[in-house]
Image (cartoon, grey):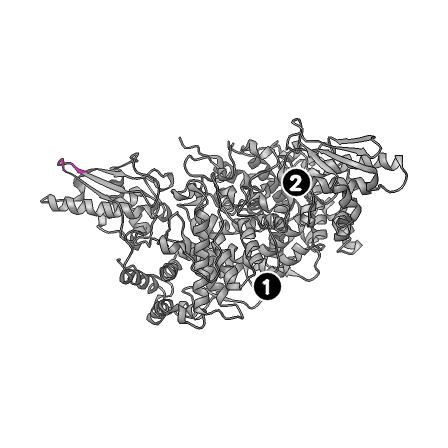
Amino acid sequence: MLRKGITESFGAAIHALSASQLTDGVINRSKRMMLDTLGVGLLGTRTAVFNKALKYSQLLTSEHRSSIWGRSEISLPPYYAAFVNGIAVHSMDFDDTWHPATHPSGAVLPALLALVETLPSRPSGLDLLLAFNVGIEVQGRLMRFSREAYNIPERFHPPSVVGVMGSAAASAKLLGLSPSQCRHALAIAASSAGAPLANAATQTKPLHIGNAARRGLEAALLAQIGLEGNPAILDMDSGLGVYYNDYSPSAMPVCASGDFRWILEDQDVAFKRIPAHLAMHWLVDAALEARAELQETAWTFDLSQIQRVTLRVPPSKYINCPLPTTEHQARHSFQFNACSALLDNRVTVASFDQARINRPALKELLSKVQVETPADNQPSFDKMYCEVQIETAQGQSCTARCNTFYGHWRKPLSQEDLVEKFSANASSVLCTEGVEGVIDVVENIEKVTEGSVLGSYLRMTSNTHEQMYLTRIL
Amino acid sequence: MVLDSVGVGLIGSTTEVFEMVLQHCKHMYGPDHVCSVYGRRGVKLSPTLAAFVNGVATHSMDFDDTWHPATHPSGAVLPAVLALSDMMPASRRPSGLDFLLAFNVGIEIQGRLMRFSNEARNIPKRFHPPTVVGPMGSAAACARLLSLDPSQCSHALAIAASLAGAPMANAATQCKPLHIGNASRLGLEAALLASRGLEASPLVLDAVAGVAGFNAFYEDYLPQPLDSPHDGHAFLLEEQDMGFKRFPAHLGMHWVADAAASVHKLLVGVVPGKVSPDQVQDILLRVPLSKYINRPFPESEHEARHSFQFNACSALLDGEVTVQSFTPAAMSRPELHALLSRVRLEHPHDNPANFNLMYGEVQVTLVGGDILRGRCDTFYGHWRNPLTNESLWKKFRSNAEVVLPSEKVERLVEVVDKLDRLGDCRDLLSQLQ
C-alpha cells in the first residue's frame, strides 16, 4: 500500500511556516548558531582546502568556454557544459545501457568534450578515445564489485554511483594526472555519488547523468590542484561500499606495456531504438510480434476487439506504471509501451509526445492491461524476457515472447542502423555538414589531430531547425 | 558508443528539461559575480560557487556546530541563504526576519528528516550526515526565501535528494569540508531549479517498496508527515539545543580533551611546571567504538582532528586543545609523539557511539605507579552545558579577527544580535569581507 503525503506535507510546511511562529527561544539559539558559523567560516578562509576550492571556483570565472551541443551561439564554462550536455544525453532515456546495468557513455563523453575544448595541451582524437575508454572501463570494474549491481536497481540509480567515478577517471586521464592524483579524483568523486531511484521516471532523472558528468570533471580538476580525499576510497565499506549491500572490491590489473583486457571487449553495450527504459525494448518487440500474428490469423482485426492484454515481465516497481501522465513516466511504463506498440504498430520518438500520451484510444487500451511477474523472469538485463498475450472478444489468443531485442548486446545494431539512428537524431538540430562531420570525425577519431574539432561540428546548427525537432521514424 | 551518445545528446537538446537547465546555467553564470566570499575583500563569485566556498570554509577545520541527532546543520544552510540574499535585487532583498526564518526552516527540516531513522541517532558509519540532510536543509531554506509554492518546495527537496549522500571514508581527509560546501550549493541549486519548474519525484520522502527515495540513505526508515504549521508550532531547536565547539576538532574529541585537561591539572599540581612524557608510563582512553576517530598516529591536520589519541595527548601536554594545536609545528612535537606511543583504547559497553550518551575517560599511569583519572560526561559547549553568550562571542571574535578588522567584527556581532529587527539584510552581507 502506497504511503502518501509525507513529501507533500513537507512542501506545504516549507511554504507556510511564517515568522509569527518563531519564538524567542528559537530566535536566540539560531542567532548564536549564525554567529558561530560566520566566525568559524571566516577563520576557515585561511585553510589550504578553502584556498583550493576558491582557486578552483575562480577558474570558472575565466574565459574558458565549451560548446553546447546543438547551439551555435552559446558556450558555457566546462563544468556547466558537461552538465547540460549530459542532461541532453539522458533527457529521453535514449542513451546506451550496459551490463551490469548503467548508462556509461552519457556520464563520460560530455565531460571529456567540455574539457578537450579548453585544455592548452590540445588533446588529439586518440587521447579523447583513450580517456573515454578509461571512463567506461572504470565504471565496468566498479559494478563488478557487487552482486547487487547485476540486477535492475532498487536503491541508487547506477549512473549516479559509477557514472561520476567514470567521469572522474576519464577526466583525470585526459588531464594527464599522476597516479596519486587519479586516486584522489576517485575519492573526491565518491563524495558526489549516489542519487535515489525514486527520481527515475521524473524530469530530474536526466540530471543524474548531467551531474555525474560535471561532478566527475570537477573531482578531477580539484585533484589536479592538489585536493585530497581518502586514498582507500574503493577499498573500504565506508567508501564506495556505502552504495551497495554486498561489496567485494578487487584491484585493477597492472597495465604495463603488455595486453590489457578491456571489459568492453567481452561485454558490449546495448543501443536503444526507442527512447524509453531498456526493459521496454523487449516488450515492444514482443507486442509487435503478437500484433502481427493476430493480424495474420484473424480475417478482420481491429483493436477494439482486444479484451485483455497480459504482460509477463520481470519484477521492477519503477517501470510498472499503469497510467502514466508525463513523458518521463511513459518512458518507464511497461503498460504504455505495450499499448503504443499495439495501437500504432511502432514505437518512436514521437510516441512520447503529450498529445499521444493523452489519447483516449490509448487510455482505453491501457485499462485492459494486466501485468504478471513470472518467477522465472529475473530482473536482470542479461536474463530477462518479455511476453505479450493478446486476447480478443472473439476468443482468439496470441502470445509472443522476446528474449533478445534487436539492439541488445547479444544482437547488436548493425553499423548502418546505428548511423541511421544518429543521423535521424542529429538532423533535428544540425545541418547536413554538421551531421556528416560528426560521423566522419568519430569514425576516424584515432587519426584526428585535434579532439576539439568535434565540438565545432556539434555547433553547426541548421538555420531553419535550430529550435524545433523533426520526428522521424526509425 | 561515442557516435550514439552524441546523436542522442543532440536530439535531447530539444527537450524541455534541457532548455530549463540551460537557462539556469546561463543565468547562474552571468558576467557579474555578485556574492561575497567570507573574509576576502572584493572577491565575489556566482551564487552557487559562493555558497560552495563559504560552506567549505565553515567546515574546513571541523569547528562548526553539531546537533543531535548528529549533523552539522548551520554550515549547510547559512552560506546558501547568504548567497541567495546577495543575489536578489535591492528591491527584493529579504529583511533580517525573512533571513532568520529561512535559516530556521533549513535547520528544522534537517532535524525532522534525521528523526525518520534510528540509525541517525548514533555516530555515523555509512553516509556522512551533512551530505544526507544538509542538501535537503539548504533546499528547504532557499525555497522558503524564494517564496516557492508548496509544490515547488516539494520538488526542491526531491531534486536535492538526487544530490545527497557522501561516504564516511572521506571524513578525516581534506575532502570532508567539501561535504558541507556541496550541501549548501547543491541545495541552493535544487531550489533554483525548482523555481524554474523542474520536477522530480513527489514521493521522495515517502517509503515506497522497491523504489528507494530518501530512504536509500538509511537502513531503517520511518517517515512522518510534517504538521501544517499553526500558531504554536514547536521548532525542534526549541527542544534540542545545538553544541558549539571550543576547539576545531570532531565533537567526540571534546570529551577526551576535557577529561585529559583535568588530569593535566592534577599532574601540574604534583610536579609544578610542564608535563613531561617521562613521567607517564601508560595512557588509557575509555571511549566509544568508532573507527574513523580512532587514529593512533595521525599524519595530517584532518586526521588529527579525528583522533581520540591526538586530542587526549595534546590536552594532557598543554592543558587544553586550541586552534594552534593542529599546526604542523605543534603536531610534530617529540613530546607529543612520546605520549602518543603510550596510548591504548578501551571501548566499554556502557559507552555508546552516540553524542547524547557517550563519555570520555582518561586514565594515566605514572612511572611511579600512581594512577590519575579524569572523566567527562558533558563537555562545556555540549547542548546539556551550553556555551554562555560571552564564551560564544569570545570564540567568534577570536576567529573573525584573523581576517576582518575589529570594526567589522563588532558590527557583525551587533547585526546578528539584532537580526530579527533588521530591515534589510544587506547590513549583514556587507560585513562579511
Which segment did they paint magenta?
A391-396
- Quarter of the image where one finds residue B18: bottom left
List the residue tagged with mark 1: A59
Figure check: B255 above or below B305:
above
Residue A394 is a magenta residue: yes
> Residue placed farthest to the top in the image?
B350
Q: Amino acid at mark 2?
A: Ile
Indicate the chain on which mark 1 is placed: A
Residue tagged 2:
B293
Viewed as shown, does residue A219 lie left or right of B297?
left
Within the image, what quadrant is residue A151 found in?
top left
Is residue B433 rendered magenta in the image? no
Q: Secondary structure at mark 2?
A: helix
User: x, y percentage for residue A404?
Assistant: 27, 48
- Residue A443 in view: yes
Locate residue A30 relative to residue A68 in the image: left or right. Answer: right
B396 or A55: nearer the eye? A55
Q: On the rendered structure, is A450 left or right of A49?
A: left
Protein chain holding label 2: B
Q: Position of residue B157 (x, y in %)?
A: 51, 43
